[in-house]
Image (cartoon, rainbow, N blue to C red):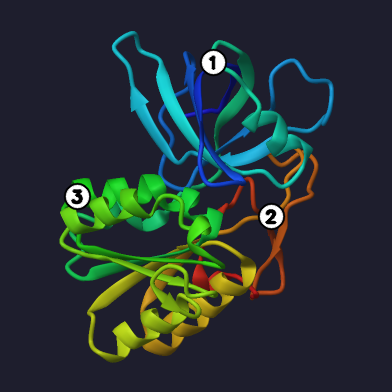
Amino acid sequence: MAAVDSRGEVLDVQALPLPYFLLRARVAAMVPAEPGQFVMVAGANRPEPYLRRAFSVYAQEATSDGSLVISLLGKVIGRGTEALAACVPGERIPVLGPLGTGFHSVADSASESGRAALVAGGIGSAGLGLLAEALERAGRSFDFFYGGRSAEDLVEAETFRRLSERAGGRLVKTTEDGSAGERGLITAPLEAGLRAGAGYTTVFTCGPHGLMAAVARIAAAAGIAGEAATETPMGCGYGACLGCAVALKNGGYALCCRQGPVFRLEEVAW
């Protein structure tokens, strides 16, 4: 269904370990997002920054009055995200969405016989929230690989531990400083699991470009399919500004906001 531009009522903003936050807003006119889709949002009653910011729909819940409560997991890195983190309950913020193309493999999750591996780097976990919930509902087992620079970057580890365990999987954590889980990069236990015969048939990833490129190489070497929820700066969110081009292996380009943000790993020129 088409995206709708409306106003969302801020319900609360949960302060997570700095600089992370979790904003919940009630949006009356928005239809539920597919896993991997996003919204364009901005702070309340602020003339600057002029452009909205793209946020993955991390979680959502339909209410009895027909509205949709969406959760946005964010990290303060500039004026736009700072404005959102500063919102207070009752304020109304502009919300355009849902936008983009979500994960292609979700529709086949119930019939998929193998396990899935979800690989997130830091705030990239926001792009995998709805996917993890969908896989758990479909009864498909998955392991969630969660990496960051330090323990503070694994802000939703408990949520993903609960979802993965309910699906018959587990949470695997790594940090570069060793403050949570094993010391190192999250790709190391993913490769180790594949070598040990973990039985993954699909890998899904979201995070820094380097992480997703590494996951793409690992998946290709193992001969398994995969998808990535890419992250590029966006000006509009619907293809007018042409500012979010993603280079493809076939030599062309695709717009992250229209053909993406989710692409099959083999499509992208990493």
Residue 18, percent from left and from top: 59, 46
Name the residue carrying label 2: 232
Task: Identify the residue shown where x is 64% and y is 75%.
Answer: 270
Asked if residue 70 is positioned above or below residue 269 in the image, the reply reads above
Task: Name which of mark 3 and mark 2 comes first in the sequence.
Answer: 3
State the SS at label 3. helix
Label pair 3/2, CB-CB below 8 angstroms: no
Q: CA gap, disc 2 to disc 1?
A: 29 Å
The mark lying in front, picked from 2 and 1, is 1
Q: CA gap, disc 1 to disc 3?
A: 34 Å
**Residue 107 seen in render:** yes
Q: Amino acid at mark 1?
A: Pro
Name the residue carrying label 1: 89
Place residue 112 in its image quadrant.
Answer: bottom left
Place residue 200 in its image quadrant.
Answer: bottom left
Task: Name which of mark 2 and mark 1 comes first in the sequence.
Answer: 1
Place residue 68 in its image quadrant.
Answer: top left
Q: Amino acid at mark 3?
A: Ala
Name the residue carrying label 3: 138
Q: Amino acid at mark 2?
A: Thr
Label pair 2/1, CB-CB below 8 angstroms: no
The mark lying in front, picked from 1 and 3, is 1
State the SS at label 1. loop
Task: Name which of mark 1 and mark 3 comes first in the sequence.
Answer: 1
Q: Nearer the viewer, residue 61 or 189?
A: 189
Task: Identify the residue shown where x is 69% and y is 28%.
Answer: 42
Task: Identify the residue shown where x is 15% and y is 61%.
Answer: 168
Task: Identify the residue shown where x is 43% and y is 83%.
Answer: 188
